[in-house]
Image (tube, coloured by chain):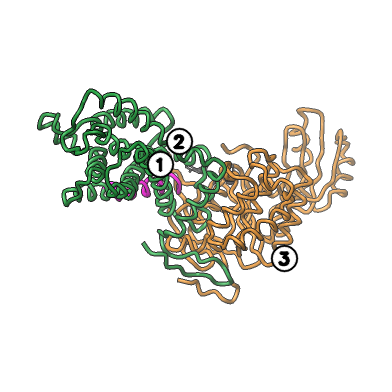
Chain colours: A orange, B green
Amino acid sequence: MALQTPADDVLLHADGLVKRYRRTRRSEPFTAVDGIGFAVRRGEAFGFLGPNGAGKSSTMRMIACVSPASAGTLRVLGHDPAADGALIRSRIGVVPQDDTLDAELTVRENILVYGRYFGLPRRAVRGKAAELLEFAQLTERADSPVENLSGGMRRRLTIARSLVNDPEILLLDEPTTGLDPQARHALWDKLFRLKRSGITLILTTHYMDEAEQLCDRLVVMDHGRIVATDTPAGLIGRHSTPEVLELRFHPGAQSVMAEKLADLAVRTEVLPERLLLYTADGRTTLTRVLARNADPLTSLVRRATLEDVFLTLTGRTLVD
Amino acid sequence: MSTKTSGGERGHPPGGRTRLSVRRSARLVERHLMIHRHTPGVLVAEIFEPLLYLLSIGVGIGRLVGDVPGVADSAAGYSAFVAPALLATAAMNGAMNETTFNLLRKLRVDRVYDSMLTTPMTVWDIALGEVCWAVLRGTLAATGFLAVIAVLGLVQSPWALLVVPCAALVGFAFAAVGLAVTTFLRGWQDFQYIQLAMLPMFLFATTFYPLDVYPRPAQAAVACLPLYQSIQLTREIALGRVGPPLLVAVVYLVLMGLAGLVVARGRLARVLLS
Ligand SMILES: Nc1ncnc2c1ncn2[C@@H]1O[C@H](COP(=O)(O)OP(=O)(O)OP(=O)(O)O)[C@@H](O)[C@H]1O
Ligand SMILES: [Mg+2]
């Protein structure tokens, strides 16, 4: 059953993967993931980006073997989730989008019991729990009920818990949503450390800086399909200009100005309060804008980010 | 039902290819034990309800009844007739409380199983683990009740110890069916329907009088009730009437439990693995 790809050591492979949900018994099935394909090699950090409802969590849940695929092939660690779910799950770590901590147990017991679900010996799991509590900076709270933890602490505990079985692949569904900036940066450091130790990271995020920081490669999903795959830098190079000039005019004047200045930029985008000019060299463009007596109220030259790519690819309007 | 395991590469815990593993199920029981470690009293609370029935109806009404056909010791009389039925009820309630009330909370509110299913635990393991735990609760309640009635002098022969495994069997049958039913419940309000079935069954399943007080057609209907079969089993054994006819009840309860388990596991998979 093992997939024969020793050369590049593909840990995760999907082809034509589909997830359909039946909302009620009678209704037509709803397609949340619509035939996606990707491959992840050992040691990579691979990200899923996409607006709400794009199908990121559905994909993650199929990889985690807690949601059966409706069609297509999926191989995790060379195994088929449909046949060897328990085997795969014993070798991966899962951080779901919503924390699923055991409310009836304390912080430490959550890790102990979770480790036991993996069949780890009691003694081993006790040592592991101490280590992971330290990792999550929760040692002081070890004996409090999880109900008393803040949202960020719960997140940290969920992540710590997912490491109890020394997973080869760690699945993180929006790991830092709800964390304060300090906690986010601390978590990034931890994820870097895990990555250096050889763990393959699969993550979804709504934070573009997070994706840029953490991911070697990423895919952008929209409406259940993959609309782009590349490195963060590659995506910016391919779908955006290197720089963006942001101009603000009097309210209501943005679209008039956009027409006037369109020839100065590769692409323009009109927002309610701002006009974006996508250009290779922001300063030169700004000089030209000023030479036309356009007189913006404010102007800002910045590097293009993944956010620009994301919004370009998936549109600015809320999908659902 | 095998515990064969594979994997174990790189020092990883064996994951196994099996869909059902007794060892994995035991880990769910371990979780419950960890929680109840702090509140052991709850575990025996279930003996009070049958005890109240025994003292009020068994002893009180027993005064009026006098001799009961089939009960040799007329001193114990009616109480000795009612006590095994209440013991079966204790096993039933002890087990079913776990797989109905408590389970609905774990399934819908605490969502305990969501995190279990990200580990090698399977839906089969969860179904079996919960039923085992419920059997444990039911057996504990029944054993506690047995100890109390022994002290009250209502146990007539050492054969009565056999009612403990019987209580486990009763617990198994009701726990599994309770689990299956719970997966269909939409919310707490639906428990009324369970009550609507359980209370009449408790009253009419020959708990307080023998089957032959009913007219013939009613006898056949009552004999189909699972609680009747449970009571039949415990009562006959407690009264020292062990014989082949009891196999009917044993087979009935085993089949009922297995059917419940299969339905429960299918339903749990639907609810948990969307
Ligand atoms: N269990 C389910 N039953 C029915 N529909 C579902 C289920 N889970 C997800 N969906 C639907 O599938 C679509 C994709 O959901 P999914 O959770 O995968 O999106 P997502 O990309 O993770 O979004 P978000 O960024 O908001 O977390 C949504 O329209 C959602 O309503
Ligand atoms: Mg999601």
- Identify which amino acid the numbered label 1 is placed on: Gly
- The numbered mark at residue A196 is 3
Q: Which of B162 and A11 is in front in this view?
A: B162
Q: For mark 2, what is the residue?
A: B45
Which residue does the image show at 73% across and 32% down from the upper left?
A272
- Measured in 3D between alpha carbons, the distance from the residue under mark 3 to the one under mark 1, in whole angstroms, is 56 Å
Tell me where residue B173 appears, x and y as whole percent: 31, 45
Tell me: residue A291, above or below residue A237. above
Mark nearest the camera among 3 and 2 is 2
Separation of residues labelled 2 and 1 (CA atoms): 9 Å
The residue nearer to you, when weighing A269 against B114, is B114
One can see residue A311 in this view: no
Q: Where is residue B97 in the image (x, y as percent from the top left)?
A: 41, 37
Above or below, B160 relative to B195: below
Q: Which of the pair B1/B146 is nearer the observer? A: B146
**Looking at the picture, which amino acid does disc 2 mark?**
Ala
User: Does any atom of ligand 2 lie closer than 8 Å to the CB of label 3?
Assistant: no
Which quadrant would residue B197 be assigned to in this image? top left
Magenta part of the protein: which range?
Answer: B256-274
- Dot 2 falls on a residue whose secondary structure is helix
Q: Quadrant of residue B184?
A: top left
Query: In 3D space, how far apart are the residues under numbered discs 3 and 2 (Cα atoms)?
Result: 53 Å
Residue drawn at point x = 89 percent, y = 45 percent: A287
Q: Residues within 10 Å of mark 3 (few under 14, many from 20)?
A: few
Q: Quadrant of the C terminus of chain A?
A: top right
Assess disc 2: are there few (<14), some (14-19) or many (≥20) residues with their C-alpha within 10 Å of its C-alpha. Answer: few
Q: Which residue is labeled 1 in the image?
A: B144
Decide whether the magenta segment is chiefly helix, strand or loop. Answer: helix
- Give the amino acid at mark 3: Arg
